[in-house]
Image: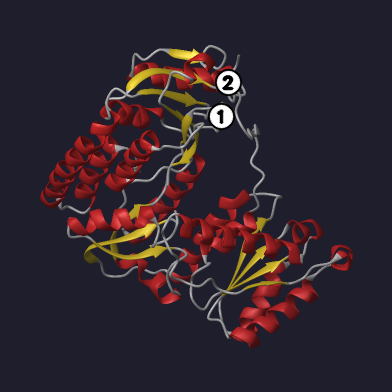
Amino acid sequence: MAIETKRFINSRKSCSCSMPGAWRAVAYMRGVVVIFHSPRSCTHVATTMDINAHFRSMGDGYHEKGRTVPLVSSLLSEKESIFGGTDKLQRCIDFVVQAYHPPCVVIANSCVSGVIGDDVGSVAADAEAQYQIPFITLNCYGFLDGEYYGGYFETIKNLIARFMKPLPKQAGTAVLFGDNGGPWGHYATEVTRLLRGMGVRVLSQFPSYLTLEEVRQVPSAEGMVILGGKGKTQEGFEEIAQELEEKFHIKHMPQIYPVGWSDTQKWILAMGELFQCQKAAQQVLEQEQADFAKMVEKFVSFTKNKKAILCVGRWLMYFDPVTVIETMERLQLDFLGIVMLNTFDDDVHRLEMEAVIRACTDVPIYNYQEGSSLLQEADIVLSTHELQEPGIKQIFLPMLPKVGTKGEKDFMQAIQRTLCSKTQGGGIFYVK
């Protein structure tokens, strides 16, 4: 009998929109107002995404401390889709300026404005001359091009072009670049903690979480730390970081993603090189190693010799099996095998994943039909997908794993708590 996954969606194409990305890039930038040249529903989608992110942060124990900026729709309708919507956009701009007195307005375009060909740039230029405040318009049109990060990166590039100039450097300072849950989220707080131990002061988190005046101060930072990940998104962050280094001499290092204990140690040393504080970085590393050893010793007393299986069904660009396997071996679990799920839509991605797995472990690999009988033998199953298998304790591995020493601690703690759970009939546990 084959293993069945739950709620599996197999899609080769992303279907995201550039407008929420543009909104998120300035969502907490106090004083700014965002206009969506769009129907009302587009602002509803972006607001709903933001509300969901807020409650997700609360669920993870990271409470947002800021308030989002106003988001206003020009309220395009069927009439404007035929006759054009520039008059309605102008009236919307007049309302925004009179109601909010913003120091800057960002206008994001929808699919509708792109299809009907509204000259948003000319309307914005006239408004800037009239009101003497910056208006930023984007060359992205909803679903027509760019996707979410198209709008996000386009907004960042405009902020750099409009507000940044070379400044004298503040030694030992860093700017965090990216979002990943904001300055109150796990990624930013863990990175800030480690940098502080090296004597590096974090000035701000760019772009969403600073004022326009703080945006102008970004070039004074000595270095930039990307809060990124992998794949195309990371490439976008690297491209902009390289531009900032060339224009304003803000140093950055090609990303070492600090997920898993091995890469966290590499990241600490890399930050020492970046900010020329190698001695302090070595001291931080030694302290983290000592604390980590104590944590592992504590967890191993619960996990040693417990039977475990890893089920893998994500592409290599979205999931790193090496860090998970290293953690399982560190906890001295009795590793029964690795099951390749039927969620790979072609052999190429499955074989790529298998090659990486075989290079780091000699644990046997099974297909989803062979692996079904193993599940009932395991005390715990770690899986990239929810499994429709009754009676097993399974941990659902997150798409965005936590970083740093604390991230590894939380992962090990989730394994320990799952093994100690008295829940009858198995159940799914989510790593937070």
Image quadrant containing the N terminus: top right
What is the crowding at mark 2: few (fewer than 14 residues within 10 Å), some, or many (at least 20)?
Answer: many
- Residue 258 is at least partly visible in this image: no
Q: CA distance from mark 1 to mark 2?
A: 7 Å
What percent of the width, then of the height, locates residue 210? 42, 70
Looking at the picture, how far across and down is residue 345, in whole percent?
Answer: 62, 24
Residue 226 location in percent, x, y? 37, 51
Question: Is residue 222 placed above or below 217 in the rendered structure?
Answer: above
Please tell me how many numbered marks the rendered image carries: 2
Residue 139 location, quadrant: bottom right
Amino acid found under the numbered disc labelled 2: Ile
Position above or below: 211 against 51: below
State the mark number for residue 387.
Answer: 1
Going from the N terminus, do you reach mark 1 or mark 2 first? 2
Residue ID at (64%, 48%): 16
Residue 346 in the image: x percent, y percent?
60, 20
Left or right: 172 as drawn, with respect to 76:
left
**As displayed, is residue 156 above or below residue 252?**
below
Residue sitting at 39 percent across and 62 percent down?
184
Q: Which mark is residue 100?
A: none
Give the residue at x 69% y 83%.
95
- Front residue (pair 182, 176): 182
What's the mark number on residue 3? 2
Q: Classify mark 1: residues with Cα within 10 Å, few (<14), some (14-19) or many (20+).
A: many
Which residue does the image show at 68% across and 79% down from the upper left?
A: 93
Front in this rendered view, residue 6 or 274: 6
Work out which residue is located at the far bottom of the displayed protein and give it.
98
Q: Quadrant of residue 266?
A: top left
Of 347 and 333, nearer the camera is 333
- Do the numbered discs 1 and 2 sit on residues whose CB atoms are within 8 Å? yes
